[in-house]
Amino acid sequence: MVLRLLFVLLIALNIAVGAWLWLGQDDAHGRSASDPGVPTLHLLSERPPPPASISAAASAPVPQAVASLTAAPVATASVAKAQPEAPAPAPARPNSYTCISIGPFATPADMHSARGALASQAARMRSRQEQTTQTRGWWVYLPASPSRDQALAQARRLSAANIGDYFVVGSGGQPNTISLGLFKDPANARKRRDEVAAAGFPAQMTERTETVPEYWLDLAVADGARFDWRSRLRNASVGSHSTGCF
């Protein structure tokens, strides 16, 4: 019984060893580790060195013609960069002008008449009014007395000295002053003052002024243009002078 059991075990062991040997050889030599059609992977260190002809061709110098074609765009760019840029067109130069003032005109009507006569001759025009001080004449007088009675007593002394043409100022800004005359010519005023002073009276002389408006016309005329305002206005009472342009 024991022998029969050992015999069976031995047969089974032989069958198992035979199966292992058969299946192991088929797996080692008959099967592939990858799917069909997929190339096998190799390490770089396992790859064979490239042929000497391929290495020489890779390290050969680039032909001169190819190098020239490669460098041509660079040379063209250098030439284009070396060319100077075209200068920008110069802006149009504006006209230059000379500006003058004509006047003074006595009335606004005179100024407007001149503006109409010169409108076609000027590039720009403007009218303006200014205040100016004018001389009304020269006044000869005796200074004011402390009282009205004293001013009248001094007037009687003038009469006794044969000095006429006077009157005593009774109101206004200079009461009790004795006026000896208002003269347009300062020479006549000085003569009157000297005559009264020679008779022993403290005669004085002063200029009388007043503020009056005057009217001006400013014109801007292009340089080189013919402009003769006198021939158009024919007004001898006005003049002209240069002024700042506007």
Image (cartoon, rainbow, N blue to C red):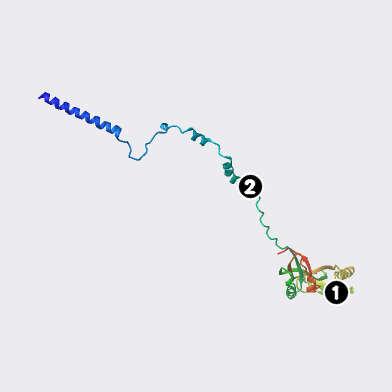
Residue at 16% over, 27% down: 9
Say which element carries label 2: helix
Residue at far top of view: 3
Residue 169 visible in the current orientation? no
Mark 2 or 1, nearer chain start: 2
Residue 46 visible in the current orientation? yes
| Left or right relative to 128: residue 49 | left
Q: In which quarter of the image is the C terminus?
A: bottom right
Of residues 186 and 240, the one nearer the viewer is 240
Residue at 63% over, 47% down: 79
Say which element carries label 1: helix
- Spatial CA span between label 2 and label 1: 112 Å
Q: How crowded is mark 1: few (under 14 residues within 10 Å), some or many (20 or more)?
A: few
Of residues 237 and 159, the one nearer the viewer is 237
Kindly check if marks 2 and 1 are in contact, taking CB atoms under 8 A apart as contact: no
Of residues 143 and 217, the one nearer the viewer is 217
What residue is shown with label 2? 79
